[in-house]
Image (cartoon, helix red, strand yellow):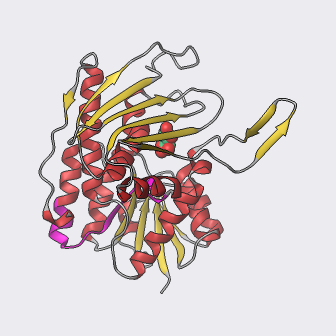
Amino acid sequence: MTIRIGLIGAGGMGRAHLARIANDLSGAVITAVADINHDAAVSAAEPYGAKAYDSSEALINAPEVDAVVIATFGKAHAPDVIRCIEAGKYVLCEKPLATTAEDCLRIMEAERKAGKRLVTVGFMRRFDAGYQEMKAVLDSGEHGYATLVHCRHRNPSVPEGYTTRNMIDDTAIHEIDICRYLLGEEIASVRIDTPRATSRRFEHLQDPLVLVATTASGVLIDDEVNVNIQFGYSIECELVMEAGTVRLGDQEKVHVRDVHGNRNAMCQSHIDRFQTAFNTEFQSWINAVARDEHTGSTSWDGYAATCVVDAALESLGNGGREVSVSMIDKPTFYA
Ligand code: ISE
């Protein structure tokens, strides 16, 4: 069975997803693209012979669309995700699932009514081989339990429209999710530390910042978010256990050896760094949709991450004091 996919949001991320579905993956074709910018929809749809829509609602209900990918801005996600659920179509929604906990709750309620998990949140790091091996090492129990996780999330630069809020709800949200995934537990409290700012930033940004979180069992997570580091896109993670540590491998595509030394090439963007993880995520989703099954992170994961983001934003606004994360009990539907 070939899955007919409709994409909402023809920006850079959306187009990268179209290219991977058409060139790298199997079992799916692109039949529709929607964007509020008509020309963007037409130019993205054209190479794939897909239909262009100005309205996401029309795309979701189109007969030639079996499943939907959403790659618009976070604020636009909730209504479209709910429409997909109501249409009974599987949806892979880029993170964040929604920008408020209330919207995530509405999404979960719609899914519960539909009686089926239809929503996958695009936390692609869960499909990265390095993070999966880290989890396997921890879960083996050989080194005892986890006590600390050290994370670094560095971007070469960000555009002027990117805000300090985005450092948490768009950037650190990846570590919030991957730490929940690695540790298999919820984050209970969080605070934001604000070190000396780099001069290589737009004036309005508080860059870098450090998100410090504590999980329900007391594991301490520190996440350096540093979005104007200049030299490249660099993601680091070290998990400390009672009798061992495990660290994410570096990006090992090629090594350059010359008079300046022996070094490996630096990725410049998440699309490059997580190319294989994105492909694995999308292929698993396509395969699962064909079997009428859910895969990847759920609406609950999207909700939990948003609750941590909300607490972190509160800490950012209150001078960095620790804030408890408040969330509902996990519904059995997501157990
Ligand atoms: C972007 O949206 C991502 O998802 C990237 O992984 C992250 O590194 C970047 O900071 C975000 O803006």
Q: Position of residue 294 (x, y in %)?
A: 33, 71
Q: Which residues are magenta?
A: 109-127
Q: Residue at x 34, y 59 (%)?
A: 297
Left or right, residue 304 beside residue 140: left
Left or right, residue 191 beside residue 290: left
Q: Position of residue 110 (x, y in %)?
A: 19, 63
Is any atom of residue 251 visible in this view?
yes
Q: Return the residue nearer the eye: 277 or 86.
A: 277
Is any atom of residue 35 visible in this view?
no
Quarter holding residue 20: bottom right
Quarter holding residue 190: top left
287 in magenta? no
Above or below residue 211? Residue 131 is below
Q: Return the residue nearer the eye: 47 or 160.
A: 160
Q: Which image quarter is the C terminus in?
A: bottom left
Quarter holding residue 267: top right
Q: Position of residue 78 (x, y in %)?
A: 29, 53
126 in magenta? yes
Q: Position of residue 162 (x, y in %)?
A: 47, 31
Left or right, residue 235 beside residue 316: right
Q: Residue at x 49, y 66 (%)?
A: 282
Q: Residue at x 60, y 43 (%)?
A: 269
Above or below residue 152? Residue 195 is above
Q: Residue at x 21, y 63 (%)?
A: 334
